[in-house]
Amino acid sequence: MNHFVFRPFKIFILSSLVMLLASCSMTVDDYNAAVVQTMVGEKGNIVATGYAVISVQPHDNPAQQRLLSIRASKLDAYRSLMEQVYGQYLDANTTVGQMMVESDTFRARVQGVIYGAYLVSITPVGEDTYEVTMSLDRDIVNDLRVLYLDQMTTRSGA
């Protein structure tokens, strides 16, 4: 008799575990979709955000520091757009001596042209930071990539 009592209980536990695992995978999918959504706007545009600290800007006038911070955060957003359009160039060097890593360095660089980006928002974050969000139309992204590939083909062929 005990065998018949535990069998439905085992089935219940097993089905509960399967449902729990299935719900976890759905939340991972939701998380991934949210991450992609932060990079791609509602029209399929690429969206980038830049940040800059106000107090470190090289000026004595607080109003001028705020303006410089807005400008710096806008340039940071442009850099982020370029990373999304063209990718990043990474240069890494590792030095090993006596089977131990002596130094490990890397540089990241992004280079390209961005046109057609538009300002979405300028927002103060806390008391000492500005956030600038910019957007770039998907069609312009495709044009920029085509121009970039043409330029790279021309350089390698010359």
Image: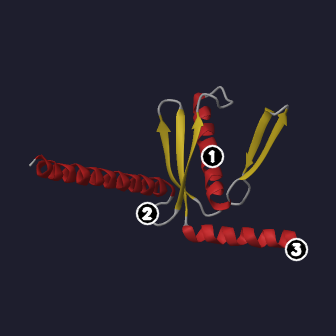
Mark 2 or mark 3, earlier in chain: 2
> How much space separates mark 2 and mark 3, taking CA atoms?
39 Å
Q: Sort mark 2 into few (<14), some (14-19) or many (20+) by Cα contacts within 10 Å.
A: few
Indicate left or right for 145 with 10 as reference: right
Q: What x and y, as percent, mark residue 90? A: 74, 50
Viewer-side residue, 65 vs 38: 38
Q: Are dots 3 and 1 in contact, CB under 8 Å?
A: no
> How much space separates mark 1 and mark 2, taking CA atoms?
22 Å
Q: Nearer the viewer, mark 3 or mark 1?
A: 3
Going 8% across and 49% down the picture, which residue do you hit?
A: 1
Indicate left or right for 3 with 138 as reference: left
Q: Sort mark 3 into few (<14), some (14-19) or many (20+) by Cα contacts within 10 Å.
A: few
Residue matched to label 2: 42
> How much space separates mark 3 and mark 1, taking CA atoms?
33 Å
Res 157 label:
3
Q: What x and y, as percent, mark residue 60? A: 65, 25
The quadrant where residue 94 appears: top right
Viewer-side residue, 139 vs 88: 88
Q: Amino acid at mark 3?
A: Gly
Indicate left or right for 89 with 132 as reference: right
Viewer-side residue, 28 vs 130: 28
Indicate left or right for 38 with 107 as reference: left
Q: Sort mark 1 into few (<14), some (14-19) or many (20+) by Cα contacts within 10 Å.
A: many
Q: Nearer the viewer, mark 2 or mark 3?
A: 3
Q: Is disc 3 placed on a helix, strand or loop?
A: helix
Q: Amino acid at mark 2?
A: Glu
The quadrant where residue 149 appears: bottom right
Mark 1 or mark 2, earlier in chain: 2
Residue matched to label 1: 76
Q: Amino acid at mark 1?
A: Asp
